[in-house]
Image: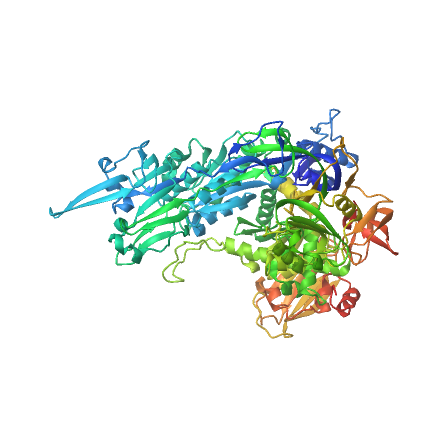
Amino acid sequence: MHNVQLLALDIGSTTTKARLFCVDESGGKLIAAADSPTTVEAPEEDVMVGVIKAVESMQRKAPGSLLTEDGEIARGPDAVKMLTASSSAGGGLQVLVTGVWRKMTAESAQRAVLGAGGVVLDVHHVNDGRLSSERVKQIRAARPDMILMTGGTEGGQVSQLVAMAEWLRSADPRPRYGDQSRIPLLYAGNSQALPLVRKALQDSVQLYVCENVRPKPGEENLEPVRDRIQQLFMEHVMSHAPGYTGVLQRVDGPILPTPGAFGIMIKQLAEKLRADVLGVDIGGATTDIFSVIGGKLNRTVSASLGMSYSISNVISSAGEENIARWLPFDVSPGMLREWAVSKMIRPTTLPQTPSDLLVEHAAAREAIRLALQHHRRLVGELKGKRRPPVAGLLKEPTARSELSLPDVEAIIASGGVLSHAGDARRAMGMVVDALSPEGLTRVLLDRGFMMPHLGAIADMDEDAALKLVPQVLVSAGWCLSPTKNDAAPGEVLGDVHLRGEGFSVCQPVRCGEMSMVQLPYGVVIEVSIEDGSRVDWGIREAQATLESRNKGEVLLLDGRKRPVGEHMGNPPRPVQQVSPFGYNAEVLENLRTGGVWGE
Amino acid sequence: MSRTAEQHWRLQQNVTLRRRRAASLPGRVMVQEGDLVEAGQEIVRVREMFSVPHLVNVARRVEERPSRLSQEDYNVKEGDRVRAGETLLEVKRSTLMVFRSIRRAKSPVAGVVESIYRELGLVLIREDRKQETASVTLDIAERIGCSGDDITDYLRVEEGEEVQQGQIIAVDQGDVRRSVLAPYDGQIGRIDRLKGAVVLQRSVTGFSVDAFVPGRVAEVIPKRGAVIESQMNRICGIYGIGGECRGTLRVLGHGSIASRLDKSMHGLVLVTEDIVTADFIFEARQCGVTAIIAAGMRVDCLYDVAGGTPDVTIDSPHLPGPTVVLTEGFGEQLRMDGRIYAMLSKFDGEQAYLDGTTQIRAGVVRPEILLPAEDDCTGEGALRKAQGELKSGDRVVVLRGPQFMRRGIIIRVLHRNVQLGFGISGPAARVRLDGGGEVVALQANLEREV
C-alpha cells in the first residue's frame, strides 16, 4: 500500500465533517480536518455544497490537490484514492417498526433498526392498546423513511400480521422524501404470512423480504435485517434526499447512517481485541450506547438524554439529588433546574466558570448512567426464550446476550462534553462514574468525533481503518476495580504493584476510595495484586500487562463499590474524590466553602 | 424563507412572510390563489373520515377452526357491500341427529368486503364512507342472550357517555363470558330497553386550519391548504407556552403588573418589560387574557404553570391559555431587550398574532410575535441577526456565568483559543458591561443584541 489518501465525510444535521487520512504500510495518519455547515436545507438544498466547502478548507494542509479546476473532488493516485461517507442529516434514517408482541418481535425489530444506525420513530404492535383509527392516523402522520414489519416466529402467528398489514394499507404511509414514490417496507416476519401480507400491501408499498428477525422464540436473527436496512437506506432514502445523489455518485462505498458507521467500528475493535467492548456517544439531544457482547453488536438510543436539547430531561429523569451527588459543593434543586432550562433554550452555550463546568460534567454522568440502564433493559436476555426445566442441566453453552461489565475490556467514548472536558482524566471520570466498569478496563476517547469516519472506511477496508485507530482514539488509561466488593469502607482490598523499566509503584486499594497512578510513556508495566483475595479483581491470577502508548495515560485504582452512583453517600462529594480526575483541588475547595451554588 | 431559517433573526421589520397553512390529512381547500384572507379565515377543512378496516375473526365468532369452514359457510364474497349486522358467515351443525345449531358471524359495520382470508377465518370489511351511518344499533339482548328489560344488568355505559372503539358496552360475567364492544368511537345516543338495544352515535370529528395572519393566498397546496403571504414585523421569542392566538396588544410597562389585571383584559395580549409570575398567569387565565409577552420567568414558575413536576422536554408544553412568549429566557433579573419593547410599545392597541410553539432540537422552532407592517412599507427594513460572527462594537448579552443576561459592548474579539482557567477555553471576546466592569466571555456565550 503506498500512501493512500482517504477522504471520509460525515454529513451531520448541522455540520459536515471532512477528514483526510493517509495510510501506508507502516500505519495511518490524520492529514487534515475541516468542518462546514451542512447544506441539506434551503437555500442550497444540496449537501454537496457543504461537502465541497469543507474539502476546500482542507486543501492547504493536503499534500496533493483535493479539488479539480471544476471544483470537483480530485480522484486518483496523487489525489483522493478512496472516498467514504456517513450521514445523519435530517435526523438520520427514520424507521417505523411493526411487530406482533412488544416483548418479542417488536423488540427484536427495534434492536435491528438501532443496530443498523436507524432512529425508531414509533413501534406499533398488536397489543399496544391503540384504536384502529388512532393507529392509522399515526402511521399516516409519521412520514418515516421506511417501515420494518415483523411478527410471528416461523410457523407461528399469521392473522395478527395480516391485521397489521391492513392497518398499514389503510394508512397509505408516505415516505419522508420523494412524495410521489411508494414507501419501502422490509418484511422480516413469519414467512408463512408473507403471501397474505403481500396481498394486502402490494399496491401500497415497495415490499422487500428478508429472513425472519425472530425465527424462534429464543432466537434472534438481526444481521440480515440490519444489512438490508442499510441497503434500503442507500437505495431509497439517500437517493431522494437533497443533493445526496451527488454524494452517492462520488463515494466508493455506501453512505452509512452515522450511528451505523460508529457501530461498525466498535465491532471491528471488539474483534481485534477479542473482547467485549462498550461504546458511548453522548450528544446534545441523544445518548447512544453500543455494546459488542460475544461478537454481537447492540445499540440503543436514549432519545431524551443529551447535553443541550434534552438536558432538562436529564435533570428530571435523574432527579436533582442524583446530579448533586457528583458535585463537591452544595447546590439547590431550583438552581439546577434553572441552569438546565437556560442551557436547553440556548443549546450552543458553553460552561464559563468552574462550577458551571462541574455541573455539566455531573449531568453527563447521569445521562450516561441512565442511557446504560436503558441499554441493559433492551439488550438483556431474549423474552420468550424457553429455559431448561432444571437449571444447570443444560450443558450446551449458549451465546451470551447480557452485558457483563467484567467482560468489557474497553470503553470507547465520544461526544462534545467529553471532548471539551479540558482534560482526558475528566472524561475518564465521567465515563467510569457513569458506567462503573469492573475488572481491568481501558478507556478510549474519540476526541475528534471521527469514529463514524473510521466506520465508513472500515466498511470498505478494515485494515486501513484499524491502522487509523491510534489517530482517532486517545487512550485516557485504565480503570482497575474489583468485581465483587462487599468489604467494609476503608478496608484494604489488595496491594497493587506496578513494575516496569525504571518504574515501580505499590499502592493499596481501600474499599470506597480511589487513586490515580500516572503511567510512564512507552513502558511495559506488569500489574500484580497482592493480598487481594478478599475480593474478585476480574483479571486472571490477579496479573495483567499494560503498555502506555499515549502521554498522560493513567491507571485508576478504584475501590468504590459498584454501581458507583449508588454508593456515593450524601452530597457534596468529597474534594479528594473529584480532584484525581484532573480538577484543580484548590479551586474545588474554594467552591466547596463558597456556600450553595447559585445562591 | 422557512420558519426554521427565520430563527436566526430576533427582530425583523416589514418583511414578507410566507406561511404554509396546511393540514396533515387531506381535506377541502377553501381558498383560491390570489384571495385576500383574514386571520381567522378557514383555509382547509378536514373531516376525519377514515375508511377504517374491520378485520372480523368469523371463525372465532362461530367457534370453528378456519379449516373446517367451507366456502358455502361464507354468506359474502370479496367486493360485496354489507350492512351493519348483516351475516358474513353462517354455520349449521347437527349434533346427535337431534339438535341443530346455527351460529352466525355478523358485520359490525356497513361497508365493503375487501378481503376474505379463508385460511385464517378472517373477513376484512372496509367501512364505506358513502354508506357510513351516523349511528349504529347494537343488539345487546341478542348478543348477551337476555331479554330487552334485562340489559340494564349487563350494561357498562349510560346514555350520553362518550365511548372509544373496543370499549365494553355490555358484558355477561357468567360461565361463558359474553361482551359487546363499541365498534368505533362515539357517544351512547339512546338505550332502548324495549328492544334491548343501544344506539351508538358515531363521532364525526373534523378540524380546520385557518390563515393565522391576514394576507394573500400565494399558492394553493392541493387537498392540504395554502401558502399565505403577508407583510409583517416579526419578533422571535426564546421560549413559549401554548399555541397560536391573536388579540389586541396592551403594554403594561415596567413595575408591578399583578394589580392591573381585571376582567376588562379579556382577549388582550399583555406585554410586560419584566418577568412574569405563575400567579399572574393563573389570574390572567381567569380574566380570559389571550396571551402574555414577558422578558422571562423563573423556572419554578414554568413548573407551577405546567402543574407539579413538568416534563420539561424539548417541546414546550401546550397548556390551556394564555399563550406565553418569553423574549429573554429564565431567571429573576431579566429585562426585555430595548428594541423589542420599543417595537411592542409602538403597536400598543394594535392586533398581534402569536405562536408560542417552541421546539428545542435540531432545526429549532422558537415562539414568534407577528405585528402587521405599515401600509406604506415597500420591502425589508432594518434586520438584526442574533447569530453570526461577532465584531468589536457589537452590543451583546452575556448568556452564561455570573454576568448572566448583563448587556454590554464588545471592545475586542479574541479569535484564538483563550484559556479561561480550569480547562475552559475557546474563542472569546472582551465585553465592557453596561454599568461598569469588563468580562472575557466565550463567544458561544454571547448573543448579539437585537
Q: Nearer the viewer, residue A144 or A249?
A: A144
Q: From this viewpoint, is residue B396 visible? A: yes
Give the total number of marks visible in the rendering.
0
Along the horizontal axis of the image, is B86 left or right of A160? left
Measured from the top left, where is residue A303 in percent x and y?
A: 58, 50
Task: Work out which quarter of the rendered image holds the N terminus of chain B and state it.
Answer: top right
Measured from the top left, where is residue A106 in percent x and y?
A: 46, 47
Q: Which of A79 and A262 is in front in this view?
A: A262
Which residue: 68% across, 63% down?
A334
Which residue: 21% across, 42% down?
B91
Q: Which of A185 and A9 is in front in this view?
A: A185
Measured from the top left, where is residue A431 in percent x and y?
A: 65, 57
Q: From this viewpoint, is residue A210 visible? A: no
Task: Work out which quarter of the rendered image holds the C terminus of chain B and state it.
Answer: top right
Measured from the top left, where is residue B11 in percent x and y?
A: 75, 42
For residue A540, which quarter of the picture? bottom right
Q: In this view, does A576 lie above or below B106?
A: below
- Furthest residue to the top? A70
Q: In this view, does A377 lie above or below A496?
A: above
Q: Which of A230 and A197 is in front in this view?
A: A197
- Furthest residue to the front? B264
State the scheme by which the image is colored.
Answer: rainbow
